């Protein structure tokens, strides 16, 4: 799908030059340069290569189609071709709805289209610009209750988030931190995409008067002024800035998430990177025509090399989280995910080491104790496993899995009474736990209580008839 988006970006740039500037001069070269940068920009790797970001790539297909059809609509409308205008209007609407269905971050599309309309018509079409921009406002207002409910549920930890490692910041702090991150994290990486990180560590911005927040607001305001200023200039630079500032990247300021920064969110804003790159290379083509191909080639080769290097981090979960741990050593979730990757790769010692680092950073996550206990059980370290599981049951007394594992441990230690008691605790918490009933049956059988053991075995089979081990 990334290839499709590269092609769409090429045609969007050509249409921006042709429709908004009413010229074809250097449009093909500008479009080629912008699309080339978009195709290899390392900051987009997270969306293209990492499965968590691919929904953004799919959304971008329809988002970019809507932009392209809208530019066609502007051209047809200015030429008073009513039939073509109706066709392109329908295609724009259909593409926009598909983008919305793919991912709700496409809510910014109408306001970006309004910006393109403003660049074309200026004051003459102001009422249409306001109407179109109002669509995004209406959508945001309609979803506000949903955003509030989502924020309240996340803040109250009623929905499991990131295996309980990350908590949602209070909304005012979240907005300040997010807007600051746009300027301080994303913008520098638009220009030179180094130190990319799949799970970066961010520092909350505590106050409205914090210098980093004030500076970020000034930067965003200056860029907004450049888009809105009445002076007639080439359309690529303001269109590029609008594609960034009015993209899903900024929409996430209204969507409460535990992760303030995730690089795959920048994918659709990559259209802005392409438009600005096209503007730069179009200017270079006019002033340094003999060097334009060489300069573009160097940039593309450097970015391609950085992208190849970046994609090595996405080769598998181990390389990914080793990369994150190097860059975010103080983030407990990074160590936990690396430990889990080691555990799944049967690297028990490495996994235990990373789990212990996780505990040193955040000792309040039950999953860490549970996974350590599983490794200790597998390694025959029964005394250590018992200590870990007892600590887990104290921390999370309503977690059935902890008591299930404790019953397994006691069965291995030939302590059927303790195994039965642990299994009963698990069943009390989760009556449909087939493995808890099975472990209880094993304990009863070891005690010589055959009839009760048979009853527990039968219950396990009723709950999970698909498991041959229970039959």
Image (cartoon, rainbow, N blue to C red):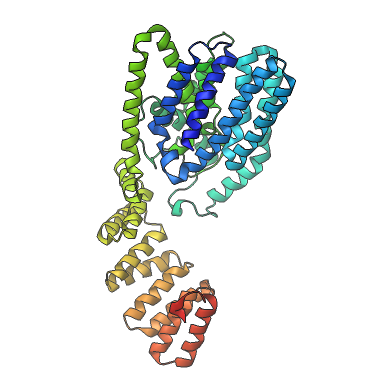
Q: Is residue 461 above or below residue 121?
A: below
- Front-most of residues 119 and 340: 119
* Residue 394 in view in this figure: yes
Q: Please, is residue 89 above or below residue 147 in the view?
A: above
124 over 346 or under it: above or below: above
On the image, the x and y values in percent for residue 159 come to 54, 54
Say whether residue 357 is left or right of residue 178: left
Is residue 318 or residue 301 the one in the foreground?
301
Residue sitting at 48 percent across and 20 percent down?
Answer: 31
- Image coordinates of residue 77 in percent, x first then y, are 69, 18
The residue furthest right is 82
Q: Residue at x 48, y 92 (%)?
A: 451
**Residue 262 appears anywhere in the view:** no
Image-based side of 14 in relation to 293, left or right: right
Give the residue at x 46% y 75%.
435
Q: Nearer the viewer, residue 209 or 397?
A: 397
Callout count? 0
Query: Residue 10 placed where, x, y %?
Result: 50, 24
65 left or right of 57?
A: right
Image vertical order of residue 122 relative to residue 69, above or below: above
Coordinates of residue 133 in the picture (x, y in percent): 66, 26
């Amino acid at each position: 799908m990334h290839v499709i988006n590269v092609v769409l970006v090429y045609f969007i740039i050509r249409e921006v030059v042709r429709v908004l500037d009413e010229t074809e001069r250097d449009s093909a070269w500008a479009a080629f340069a912008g699309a080339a940068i978009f195709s290899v920009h390392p900051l987009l790797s997270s969306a293209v290569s990492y499965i968590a970001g691919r929904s953004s790539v799919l959304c971008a297909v329809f988002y970019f189609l809507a932009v392209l059809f809208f530019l066609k609509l502007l051209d047809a409308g200015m030429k008073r071709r009513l039939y073509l205008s109706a066709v392109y209007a329908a295609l724009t609407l259909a593409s926009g709805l598909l983008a919305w269905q793919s991912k709700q971050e496409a809510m910014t599309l109408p306001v970006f289209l309004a910006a393109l309309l403003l660049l074309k018509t200026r004051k003459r079409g102001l009422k249409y610009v306001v109407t179109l921009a109002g669509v995004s406002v209406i959508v945001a207002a309609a979803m506000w209750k949903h955003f509030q409910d989502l924020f309240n549920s996340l803040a109250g930890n009623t929905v499991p988030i990131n295996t309980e490692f990350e908590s949602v910041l209070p909304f005012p702090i979240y907005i300040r931190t997010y807007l600051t991150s746009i300027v301080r994290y994303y913008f520098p990486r638009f220009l030179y995409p180094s130190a990319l990180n799949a799970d970066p560590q961010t520092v909350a911005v505590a106050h409205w008067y914090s210098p980093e927040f004030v500076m970020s607001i000034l930067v965003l305001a200056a860029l907004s002024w450049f888009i809105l200023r009445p002076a007639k200039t080439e359309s690529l630079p303001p269109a590029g800035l609008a594609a960034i500032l009015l993209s899903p990247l900024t929409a996430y300021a209204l969507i409460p998430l535990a992760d303030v920064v995730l690089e795959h969110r920048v994918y659709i804003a990559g259209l802005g990177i392409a438009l600005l790159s096209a503007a730069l290379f179009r200017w270079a083509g006019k002033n340094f025509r003999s060097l334009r191909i060489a300069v573009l080639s160097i940039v593309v080769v450097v970015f391609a090399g950085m992208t190849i290097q970046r994609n090595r981090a996405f080769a598998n979960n181990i390389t990914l989280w080793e990369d994150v741990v190097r860059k975010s050593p103080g983030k407990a979730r990074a160590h936990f995910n690396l430990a889990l990757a080691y555990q799944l790769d049967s690297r028990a010692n490495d996994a235990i080491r990373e789990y212990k680092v996780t505990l040193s950073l955040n000792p309040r996550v039950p999953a860490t104790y549970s996974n350590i206990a599983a490794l200790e059980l597998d390694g025959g370290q029964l005394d250590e496993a018992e200590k870990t599981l007892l600590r887990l049951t104290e921390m999370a007394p309503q977690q059935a899995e902890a008591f299930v594992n404790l019953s397994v441990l006691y069965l291995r230690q030939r302590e059927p009474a303790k195994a039965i008691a642990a299994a009963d605790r698990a069943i009390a918490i989760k009556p449909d736990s087939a493995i808890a009933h099975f472990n209880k049956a094993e304990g009863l059988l070891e005690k010589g209580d055959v009839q009760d053991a048979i009853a527990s075995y039968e219950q396990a089979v009723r709950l999970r008839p698909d498991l041959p081990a229970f039959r």
